[in-house]
Amino acid sequence: MKLNIGTKVNVLIIVALILVGGASLLLSIPSLKKGGELGIQDYRKGMIGEKKTQIQDLVNSSFVIAKERLDSSSQVKEKANGLSGIASALSEMMGRFKV
């Protein structure tokens, strides 16, 4: 089977293109994997940072709520102490006026 020059050139070009494509695939796959791993690490770091920020905000909010409740309970305790003093004073006065 005799091939003319045009067919030989076409076959040579096709073989060259296949070899170049295969070589570029072999060279690009490791860099794509490395780039993917770096992207995943960056994403993970970003998500961890965001979660830490959210947790810190929740802790701060909890602290503020607990402090407000403590202050409120201290005020209630002070009022209760004041009322018990008034109640004891009234009972003393009532004891004086017993007939």
Image: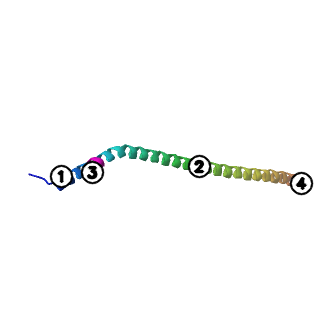
Badge 2 vs badge 4, beta-carbon distance below 8 Å: no
CA gap, disc 1 to disc 2? Answer: 66 Å
Which percent across, then down, holds residue 83?
81, 54
Residue annotated with mark 4:
93
Nearer to us: label 4 or label 1: 1
Residue annotated with mark 2:
53
Most foreground residue, 86 or 53:
53
CA gap, disc 4 to disc 3? Answer: 111 Å
Residue annotated with mark 3:
17
Badge 4 vs badge 1, beta-carbon distance below 8 Å: no
Q: Name the secondary structure under disc 4.
A: helix
Q: Earlier in the sequence, mark 3 or mark 2?
A: 3
The residue lying at 55 percent from left, 49 percent from top is: 51
The amino acid at mark 4 is Met
Nearer to us: label 4 or label 3: 3
Most foreground residue, 6 or 65:
6
Q: Earlier in the sequence, mark 4 or mark 3?
A: 3
Q: Earlier in the sequence, mark 2 or mark 4?
A: 2
Q: Which residues are magenta?
A: 17-21
CA gap, disc 4 to disc 1? Answer: 125 Å
Which percent across, then down, holds residue 88?
84, 51
Residue annotated with mark 1:
8
Which percent across, then down, holds residue 76?
75, 53
Nearer to us: label 3 or label 1: 1
- Circle 1 crowding by C-alpha within 10 Å: few under 14, some 14–19, many from 20: few
- Circle 4 crowding by C-alpha within 10 Å: few under 14, some 14–19, many from 20: few
Badge 1 vs badge 2, beta-carbon distance below 8 Å: no
**Left or right: where 61 falls relative to 40:** right
- Circle 3 crowding by C-alpha within 10 Å: few under 14, some 14–19, many from 20: few
- Circle 2 crowding by C-alpha within 10 Å: few under 14, some 14–19, many from 20: few
Q: Earlier in the sequence, mark 1 or mark 2?
A: 1
